Image (cartoon, helix red, strand yellow):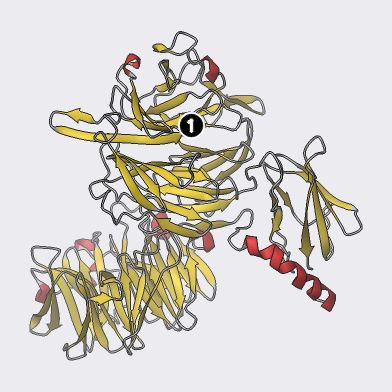
């Protein structure tokens, strides 16, 4: 790079990079995992690997920096069951909950999907990984699988049950000249030098452990340590195994047993205890700086105790008594994604839910909010939600954006300000406007959804009630609206305030959509009215940017184009005349209904009015604004998508980031469309910017008016590229119209709407 370009770069970097630090590149994926629940810790040279529910992170012990390892960064799957590191081959073995396996070595990922793809019936879980003589031995639900780490392939599978039958192996250990296996048939043993471990007769049941259900093994100080139980799996007794048999020496709620650094480290419910080679206690750790030592796994490595904590991530205690906690940024305690609610630069995650029969799931009443890559969880320390659970929806007050209202299935709605719960609204303090569901002595207030209208009134959807809609007016007064003329309204948990008509549309468990004008008119919509494809379950309901209502069903998508006709038959609770139309798409000589073979779970609308559609088993689709064209189809097989089962979707309108809740966790994808204002933003910028040598990906330019015409020129004013924005964002590939890469230099971006008005400008530096 010449001195001239360094000088230009120095001038432009501060203004270009400051607003872009949290931005993702177009087409990039990242995870939204909770890394606070670490269940396995693996030391390596200069690093510590920590396995959490969804992924792994690697801590560089010298710098303290952390690297995420999951499917968005190159691993093959989601849902980590266990990990183990072999210091000889410098290989990290990752076993997934679906029995897939990755080998990480030399900066590359080698996938072994043999067990996952096998037709083995029953349990294929991988419980533990051990290493010996250049091979990895996997304890599985059906036997032992041996991997040759040099060849990176499965060498053999050992079925060691009686007569070669499958038997679950939960742990393995190499001690002396023997390999031991903790199996469902008892403790088994074979010679390490045995060349035919696949022959079940080579494995003998060790009678010394008779009567004990062995669950953990560890070779330590020349002896085999055995952990097991007789009656209660929660109470483990630890034994020394010698010629005379098992000698008990410890017991209790023991979760892990690890040898390392000359000591034996026990992870217990109440903390960590360490023993020397004579099995004399060295120390115990029951707390750290700001909490109890609630651990899942613990090991000592190079003088430092490393702990996998149940809620604080990865902990360390050094020999000098100092310690630290480590956890990549993520949504704390995010075990479930029920609904995703975008607002401005925020994305609110509702991690509650209910069962298929609409009973409580009893998940912690947290509202989790993301702004960029920073996550916060609502402060519940005042105790107002002590008896509540299951956050299922949220909405921001458009007249007072400091207030967020949260729907709690079973407890009412909560008002949140400054990230603290201020008020819990229920039947008692709303004058009965929030009406609980009562059967005999059982009473529960199932508030399924919330929405604010244009005037700042709050609407609350109340399930199983003759008053399914409650209203908090802008002045704070509460009222309820009868819905009894529509017959008994069952469990409902999806609510749309129609920004065009002002109507309220809601649905839930039954194959019915309800509509209310917020005063006295009401009607029922048959999802099969005007549709040739008959469905029996409404699963999603959203309004797009032109006012049409998109309906997800168990057999694809439908659209209401004539919502204004909702009460044309009178509005007294009758069946409405509006149509739920199928979209017919043509593929060559054949025509079919849009996504007719998919069960839809979630729909979200992006800044270009395109629809993101999540399915129960078919992955994630992006379709055009009118539904006539499939633009993308992401699956777990063809993309970093964690799972083909999508539970929730939300599009962050300002950045175009698509938040995807799957049954394997949350992830984020940077799409090509953002929300557009009526006028261009003052902060129109591009990223990446500057474009550094070697980069050949998309350059996203955002902040335009909707669907603006975009022209990119060189310093002399010559147009090198023209395009049109999706919503408020345009994409440039750094090339000319003819496809040639542009030369190094400063390029200017001009844009206007269709009438030539609202011109805007920014600069992009290209460095080749």
Task: Classify residue 433 as left or right of residue 235.
Answer: right
- Decide if residue 412 is on the left or right side of residue 703: left
**Image mark count:** 1
Pick the residue in front: 627 or 443: 443
Q: Position of residue 709 (x, y in %)?
A: 78, 42
Task: Give how far across and how far down residue 267 sits, in percent.
Answer: 23, 74
Residue 130 visible from this viewpoint: yes
Q: Residue at x 49, y 60 (%)?
A: 374
The quadrant of the picture occupied by the N terminus is bottom right
Q: Is residue 680 shown left or right of residue 620?
A: right
* Residue that label 1 marks: 453
Q: Secondary structure at mark 1?
A: loop
Outermost residue, top side: 569
Among the 4 quarters of the image, the one containing residue 269 = bottom left
Does residue 1 sit above or below 277 in this rendering? above
Q: Is residue 654 above or below residue 209?
A: above
Q: Residue at x 27, y 49 (%)?
A: 384
- The quadrant holding residue 210 is bottom left
Q: Quadrant of the C terminus?
A: bottom right
Residue 256 position, x and y percent, is 24, 72
Q: Measured along the vertical axis of the image, is residue 79 above or below residue 444?
A: below
**Residue most toward the front?**
475
Query: Residue at image x 47%, y 62%?
Result: 70
Q: Is residue 138 visible?
A: no
Callout 1: 10 Å neighbours few (<14), some, many (20+)?
A: some
């Amino acid at each position: 790079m010449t001195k001239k370009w360094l000088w230009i770069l120095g001038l432009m970097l501060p203004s270009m990079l400051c607003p872009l630090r949290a931005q993702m590149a177009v087409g990039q994926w990242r995870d939204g995992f909770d890394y606070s629940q670490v269940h396995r810790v693996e030391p390596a040279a200069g690093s510590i690997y920590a396995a959490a529910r969804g992924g792994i992170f690697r801590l560089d012990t010298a710098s303290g920096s952390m690297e995420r390892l999951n499917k968005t960064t190159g691993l093959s799957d989601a849902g980590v069951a266990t990990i183990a590191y072999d210091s000889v081959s410098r290989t990290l073995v990752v076993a997934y909950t679906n029995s897939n396996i990755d080998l990480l070595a030399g900066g590359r990922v080698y996938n072994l999907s043999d067990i996952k793809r096998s037709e083995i019936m029953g349990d294929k879980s991988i419980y533990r990984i051990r290493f010996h003589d250049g091979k990895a031995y996997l304890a599985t639900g059906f036997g032992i699988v041996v991997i040759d780490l040099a060849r990176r392939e499965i060498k053999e599978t050992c079925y060691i049950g009686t007569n070669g039958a499958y038997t679950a192996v939960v742990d393995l250990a190499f001690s002396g000249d023997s390999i031991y296996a903790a199996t469902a048939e008892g403790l088994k043993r074979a010679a390490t030098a045995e060349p035919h471990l696949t022959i079940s007769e080579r494995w003998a049941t060790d009678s010394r452990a008779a009567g004990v259900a062995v669950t953990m093994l560890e070779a330590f100080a020349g002896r085999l340590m055995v952990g097991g139980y007789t009656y209660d799996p929660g109470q483990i007794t630890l034994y020394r195994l010698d010629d005379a048999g098992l000698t008990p020496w410890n017991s209790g709620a023991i979760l892990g047993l690890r040898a390392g650094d000359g000591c034996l480290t026990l992870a217990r419910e109440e903390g960590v205890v360490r023993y020397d080679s004579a099995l004399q206690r060295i120390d115990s750790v029951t707390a750290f700086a700001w909490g109890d030592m609630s651990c899942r796994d613990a090991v000592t490595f190079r003088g430092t105790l490393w702990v996998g904590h149940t809620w604080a991530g990865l902990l360390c205690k050094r020999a000098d008594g100092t310690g630290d906690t480590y956890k990549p940024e993520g949504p704390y305690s995010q075990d479930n994604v029920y609904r995703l609610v975008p607002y401005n630069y925020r994305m609110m995650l509702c991690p509650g839910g209910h069962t298929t029969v609409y009973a409580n799931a009893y998940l912690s009443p947290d509202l989790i909010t993301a702004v960029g890559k920073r996550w916060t969880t609502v402060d519940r320390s005042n105790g107002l939600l002590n008896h509540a659970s299951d956050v299922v929806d949220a909405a921001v007050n458009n007249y007072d954006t400091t207030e967020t209202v949260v729907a709690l299935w079973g407890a009412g709605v909560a008002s949140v300000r400054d990230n603290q719960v201020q008020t819990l609204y229920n039947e008692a303090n709303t004058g009965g406007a929030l009406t609980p569901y009562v059967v005999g002595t059982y009473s529960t207030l199932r508030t399924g959804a919330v929405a604010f209208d244009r005037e700042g009134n709050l609407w609350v959807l109340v399930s199983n009630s003759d008053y399914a809609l409650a209203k908090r007016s802008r002045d704070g007064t509460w009222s309820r609206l009868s819905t009894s003329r529509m017959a008994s309204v069952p469990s409902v948990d999806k609510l749309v305030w129609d920004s065009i008509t002002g109507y309220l549309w809601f649905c839930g468990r039954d194959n019915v959509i309800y509509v209310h004008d917020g005063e006295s008119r009401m009607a029922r919509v048959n999802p099969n009215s005007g549709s040739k494809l008959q469905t029996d379950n409404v699963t999603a309901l959203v309004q797009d940017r032109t006012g049409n209502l998109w309906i997800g069903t168990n057999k694809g998508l439908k659209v209401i184009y004539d919502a204004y006709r909702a009460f044309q038959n009178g509005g007294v609770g009758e069946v409405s005349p509006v149509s739920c139309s199928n979209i017919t798409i043509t593929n060559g000589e054949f025509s079919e209904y849009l996504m007719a073979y998919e069960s839809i779970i979630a729909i979200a609308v992006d800044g270009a009015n395109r629809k993101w559609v999540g399915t129960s088993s078919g992955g994630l689709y992006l379709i055009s604004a009118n539904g006539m064209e499939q633009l993308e189809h992401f699956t777990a097989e063809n993309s970093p998508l964690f799972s083909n089962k999508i539970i929730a979707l939300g599009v962050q309108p300002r950045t175009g980031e698509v938040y995807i809740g799957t049954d394997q966790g949350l992830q984020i994808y940077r799409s090509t469309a953002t929300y557009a204002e009526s006028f261009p933003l003052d902060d129109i910028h591009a990223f990446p910017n500057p474009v550094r040598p070697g980069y050949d990906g998309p350059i996203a330019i955002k902040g335009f008016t909707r669907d603006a015409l975009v022209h990119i020129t060189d310093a002399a004013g010559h147009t090198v590229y023209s395009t049109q924005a999706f919503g408020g964002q345009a994409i440039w590939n750094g090339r000319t119209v003819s496809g040639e890469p542009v030369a190094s230099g400063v390029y200017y971006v001009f844009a206007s709407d269709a009438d030539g008005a609202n011109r805007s400008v920014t600069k992009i530096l290209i460095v080749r």
